[in-house]
Amino acid sequence: MTDKEIQALSLSLFKQHGDMIKARADENIEKYRKGVFKLKVTDQSGKPFCDKKVRITQKTHDFKYGANIFMLDQYDSAEDNQAFRDTFYQYFNLATVPFYWGDLEPEQGKPRYEKNSPNVYRRPSPDLCVEYCEEKGISPKLHCLFYDKFLPSWVPKNDEAEMMRLYEKRFQEIAERYSGKMYEFEVINEVLSYHQEVSVLSDRKDILDWTFGLAKKYLPNEKLVINDGNFVPHIGKPHVGYHHPYYMMIQSALQRGVPIGKVGVQNHIYCGCKSPANEALPHYMDYFNPERIIKGLDVLSELGLPLEITETLIPTLGQGQWADDLQGELFKYLYTIWFSTPKMESIVYWNIIEGSAYSIPGWDENRCGGYIFKRDFTPKPAAKVVKDLFSKEWHTDLELTTDCNGEIDFKGFYGDYELTVDGEKVSFGIHKNGEKSLTVTKTEGRI
């Protein structure tokens, strides 16, 4: 395929359904991502300040947009490590923290929780990640408690009773150390996906009941997430929908009372991972089909739980500026569809820096070009799209004037805000289930 053919094919369905995507996004974003708010400015006696100019500035988003933080302090030079630290918080408000058991506890009884633990590439210690997130105002999320892959070499994979005992010990230790510090906890990962390495527990009929039961026991007040593969476009195919294994598995679990709190689904578009993108692209067109994406998300939404794109890779389908620009266009379409899905709460990109993706013989995710920052941390158009969407397009910044009652009514994206009046600042928030009004009392011309 030529460069022009790649561009035309990958964008064809988005452009064909462009009016539908925009209409859906405009309606849903206005309805589900914003809230109404009333401000009133008075003096100490309660007399309203009429015709008073105020500025309203959004400071944070309730909606989470993030990436994995696997490359925190993973470079050989202090300059590169600082560049990663300086870059991440400017673009994201959520970070996926790695808890892969094999790398977290390579030696039995000696988990690598602490900041000064021996380093493992792409697996920074949880304490290091949480400290960075707390410093930068980022929400960390745990990935994940049960994953029957990347297991320590010392676990007895064929001894069910001992595996259950060791997993419960792991759940309890992690809960004692990180309860109250995470935005959410992914309980189980890729139970429906093919594994090269599995334990006897993968065959358990009640694996969801057991893992979520353990999580609820030790993490009773936390948001508990199920995470699995790249299913959305497949769920959206004709005659699949509610009959897809992922939907049916979760529906059945909920009917049994399994305490799933959020449905996570991945969106890795592995175009180019095994073969050149121009050869692989026709086989990945479901991921560029907005009708199937929207239908798949609508089906999952009927489970009645919040949704999350837990891991996504959007490839660069060629070389040069045209390919980088194309990736940026694909980002805008996909993020717009996801953000405008009513049940969606968060979107997590996966490997953001060039050369930092998962790679083994015969499978190299770096070949997909899914990175959005070059190796020198220069942002590609895709990174700029994400930043512009959440800091400009999906962002509230207003200059308004009070009416004769000292009041202002306005609508803004959910998040934390700052009100500025006469040079003084007051913090408030617009949240889905929060307060809907604020009265500001001024004295002597100032707050």
Image: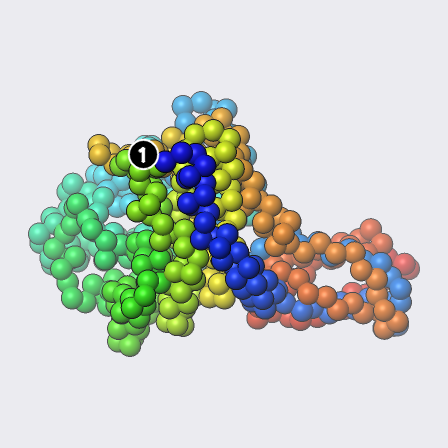
Picture layout, residue 105 above or below residue 220: above
Which three-letter amino acid code belongs to the residue tagged 1? Pro
Residue 91 visible, this angle: no
User: Where's residue 153, x and y in %?
Assistant: 16, 41
Considering the numbered disc 1 on the image, is that residue within a helix, a strand or a loop? loop
User: Where's residue 362, x and y in %?
Assistant: 22, 34
- Number of numbered discs overlaid on the protein picture: 1
Q: Quadrant of the C terminus?
A: bottom right
Sort mark 1 into few (<14), some (14-19) or many (20+) by Cα contacts within 10 Å.
some
Residue 404 visible, this angle: yes
The residue drawn where x is 50% and y is 33% is: 322
Picture layout, residue 4 above or below residue 187: above
Relative placement, left or right, of 160 versus 417 is left
Please give the residue where the numbered disc 1 appears in the rendered image: 276
Relative placement, left or right, of 13 versus 163 is right
The residue drawn where x is 72% and y is 66% is: 410
* Residue that extends furthest to the left in the rendered view of this protein: 158
User: Where's residue 404, x and y in %?
Assistant: 88, 71
**Which quadrant of the view contains residue 179?**
bottom left
Colour scheme used in the picture?
rainbow
